[in-house]
Image (cartoon, grey):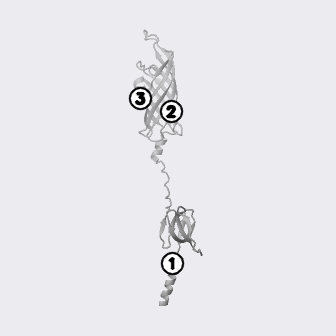
Amino acid sequence: MKHFLITGVLFLSLLASQAQDTLHMRDGRVREGTIVEVTEQNIRYIPANHTENRIFTILLEAVEKITYADGTVHYLHPPELPTHPPELPSTTNEELADRFAAVNHVSFSLIGITYRGSLSLAYERLFRSGDIAVKIPFSVGFIENDIYSFYEGQSLYRSGLGIHSYRTRRGLSKTFRGGELFAGSYKYFPDVSNSSIKATARYFGANVYYGLMVYPGKNFGISGQLGIGMAKSDQFKRYSFIMPLDFNLVFRF
């Protein structure tokens, strides 16, 4: 029995003497040996199976972790945790963005109906990017209105071509800026003393403007814009300063 115990102790001692510390390098290599000293900059160790017991030195920066003979693991440079991929836009955001991309808008001017006495509408086509749109306005007068400027009131018709640039990309609203060329005609009295005689004058002009479009519903919105420009008619033979203001009901399809 005593002989058996002595044999077991010697066997365990042999195993303990063969247990080595392990250096796990940051480049993926593994080195085994006995750790002699760990400093702030270096690790000194005796490589396994090295007959001369020579002490080697390795930079601490090159080692990711140390696994000691007793199983203890010491992380010198913990592995980086995987980063989460960026969150994709939710379905709601995609739907909002689509309201301003590759769609058609038809807008009706509230000021045109209530103040100018005309039916004013515009067709607008937004390109696939949702940043640029082409606008074609059209107005037909049905009530003579002497209060407003001759470039808008009493118009028989008005049309043109405009370009919109939308700045913001997502959400329920977008600001826009643009420019427009327009032309039209209106009725006027060449002789103020004789109201029975009317003449037709043609006019043309250009303006630039800034505005905001808001979509409270999926296919229904409102927009407003304020502009500044110049126009000239056959009646006055000179350019006049204009400052058009408009509010619109907008439908998307």
Q: Residue furthest right?
A: 51
Question: At label 1, which amino acid type do we have?
Answer: Ala
Can you tell which of label 3 and label 1 is closer to the viewer? 1
Q: Residue 110 carries which label?
A: 3
Whether residue 10 is visible here, answered yes or no, is: yes
Can you tell which of label 1 and label 2 is closer to the viewer? 1
State the residue in front, 107 or 34: 34
State the residue in front, 190 or 253: 190
Spot occupied by residue 74 in the image (x, y as percentages of width and height): 48, 66
N-term mark: 1 or 2: 1
Q: Horizontal placement of 250 versus 31: left or right? A: left
Can you tell which of label 2 and label 3 is closer to the viewer? 2
Spot occupied by residue 211 in the image (x, y as percentages of width and height): 45, 32
Vertical order, 232 against 94 (above or below) = above
Name the residue tied to disc 2.
Answer: 164
The answer to whether mark 3 and mark 1 are in CB contact below 8 A is no
| Residue under the image location 46 percent in, 27 percent down | 227
User: What is the crowding at mark 1: few (fewer than 14 residues within 10 Å), some, or many (at least 20)?
Assistant: few
User: What is the crowding at mark 3: few (fewer than 14 residues within 10 Å), some, or many (at least 20)?
Assistant: some
User: What is the crowding at mark 2: few (fewer than 14 residues within 10 Å), some, or many (at least 20)?
Assistant: many
Spot occupied by residue 171 in the image (x, y as percentages of width and height): 44, 41
Question: At label 3, which amino acid type do we have?
Answer: Leu
Vertical order, 81 against 173 (above or below) = below
Whether residue 1 is visible here, answered yes or no, is: no
The Cα–Cα distance between marks 1 and 2, rounded to whole angstroms, is 81 Å
Q: What element carries label 2?
A: strand
Name the residue tied to disc 1.
Answer: 16
The Cα–Cα distance between marks 3 and 1, rounded to whole angstroms, is 92 Å
Q: Which residue lies furthest to the top in this view?
A: 193
The Cα–Cα distance between marks 2 and 3, rounded to whole angstroms, is 20 Å
N-term mark: 2 or 3: 3
Q: Residue 237 carries which label?
A: none
